[in-house]
Amino acid sequence: MASVKKTTSLIHHPYRAPVDFEAPLTAVHKASTVFFPSVEAMKSRDWKDKSAYTYGLHGTPTTFTLEERLCAIEGGLHCLLVPSGLAAIAQVNLALLAQGDEVLLPDNVYGPSKALAKAELQQWGIAHRFYNPLDAQDLAAKITPATRLVWLEAAGSITMEFPDLVSQVQLCRERGVWCALDNTWGAGLAFNAFDLTPEQGPHSLGVDLTIHALTKYPSGGGDVLMGSIISRDDDLAMRLKLSHMRLGLMVGANDAETVLRALPSMAMRYRAQDLSARHLARCCQEQPAVLQVLHPGLPGSPGHDHWLRLCTPHAHGDLNPLNESTDAPNGWAAALFSIVIDPQYSAPQVHQFCEALQLFRLGYSWAGPVSLVVPYELSTLRSVWPSWLRPGHVVRFSIGLEATVDLQQDLSQAFSKAFPDIATQ
Ligand SMILES: *Cc1c(COP(=O)(O)O)cnc(C)c1O
């Protein structure tokens, strides 16, 4: 190129930065177009095995790096990135289900997943049924020859039931149906979804795939929406990957970088928020207006025994992500809990309680730096009111990174303000 105009030289500039650059954070590679050195390369490069780059939609160094790190957390082999946790759920349903098939969802499943089943899936001739997450017999009875996929969730993110995941996965294996776990709560840290039986036998038992809302712990900032689909089986992964490609799903490079930047601190954030949440959950147990506190780490909470089996240091063995000594507080759990408020109080009083909180903000999502509160109308979310759940108003808290004493003080002043008759202090 002998002599070109300035505008052209800005685009076709001869300078090439030296390639040997290493720093803590992977570069943000932004691309739709990717250049090929020859027609031969253009025709022969294959994006499917991640050995080369062909188009932004099929991956860049930034997204490939994020995928590999997410696999490392969970012991997965294949990862796909999608624009939100809900998109991950939708993508799995689209890739694995066809007209005439049936999908089973736990009755406490993430709400929008229910809505998707009732609207689009139904409209496309894919039936759905809800099963009791705490009753293996109920799940067994609901699997029919048409069932292709069972969704699992541990723990449920409003009522916090912790299911017997091992039995559920065993059942899916025996009946030859795929099982997909929404593992947003465990984040790949609280238990190992692809290896659920570390202490027993030569055969490890794992789910077929997990989805995560990276929006929650992996991002940790309340500022990114992203989802992942992680699997180990090559054929299943290829089926998901081809469908993902045909649907044109990808994530922005800056968002991928934001998650990459937050991953190294994830286990420490998870642990710190967990300990704070458990302290506050126990404080709420002392409040006279509170009939029940739901957190799988508390004795008496539904599925507590299942949580003990899967999420305590004993279950972790050497896999404990922070390598803590065994006398560290028991087990790992997401920083979420719900309370059931005495039905003698009115809904407006419950709303007044939520609004009286000053550090807790009203807002959806969780696992960010700011503590959040949401009152739920549970009767509209469930097909049956769970037998173990006391009638009352359900309020869920997500604990952020504020000082625990400040959050405790905030809760206590709001309880006194909204429920003055019987509140302590
Ligand atoms: C938040 C959440 C999702 C959806 O994630 P988005 O990124 O908000 O779409 C799915 N499952 C669970 C359990 C969640 O908490």
Image (cartoon, rainbow, N blue to C red):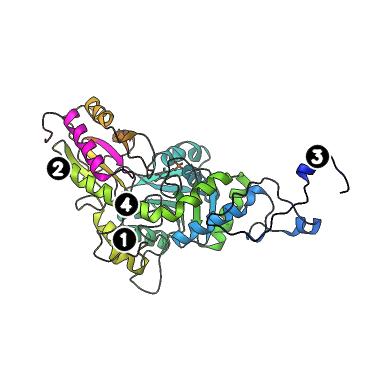
User: What kind of residue is marked 4?
Assistant: Ala
Disc 4 residue crowd, few under 14, some 14–19, many 20+, Cα 10 Å: some
Q: Which of marks 2 and 1 is nearer the N terminus?
A: 2
User: In this figure, which residue is indicated by the disc labeled 4?
Assistant: 272
Dot 2 falls on a residue whose secondary structure is loop
Q: Where is residue 104 in the image (x, y as percent from the top left)?
A: 41, 48
Position of residue 258 relative to residue 239, above or below, is above
Q: Position of residue 99 (x, y in %)?
A: 53, 45
Q: Nearer the viewer, mark 3 or mark 2?
A: 3
Instruction: Specify whether tag 4 is near ligand 1 (CB below 8 Å).
Output: no
Label 4 near label 2: C-beta < 8 Å? no
Disc 2 residue crowd, few under 14, some 14–19, many 20+, Cα 10 Å: few
Q: Compute the Cα span from label 2 to label 4.
A: 22 Å
User: What kind of residue is marked 2?
Assistant: Glu
Q: What stretch is highlighted in magenta?
A: 394-419
Label 4 near label 1: C-beta < 8 Å? no
User: In this figure, which residue is indicated by the disc labeled 2?
Assistant: 286
Q: Compute the Cα span from label 1 to label 3.
A: 64 Å
User: What kind of residue is marked 1?
Assistant: Leu
- Identify the residue at image location x=31%, y=64%: 324
Dot 4 falls on a residue whose secondary structure is helix
- State the residue in front, 345 or 117: 345
Determine whether, in the image, residue 341 is placed left or right of residue 152: left
Q: Compute the Cα span from label 1 to label 4.
A: 20 Å
Label 3 near label 4: C-beta < 8 Å? no
Label 2 near label 3: C-beta < 8 Å? no
Q: Which of marks 1 and 4 is in front?
A: 4
Position of the C terminus by quadrant: top left
What label does residue 6 carry, if any?
3
Q: Compute the Cα span from label 3 to label 2.
A: 73 Å
User: What kind of residue is marked 3?
Assistant: Lys
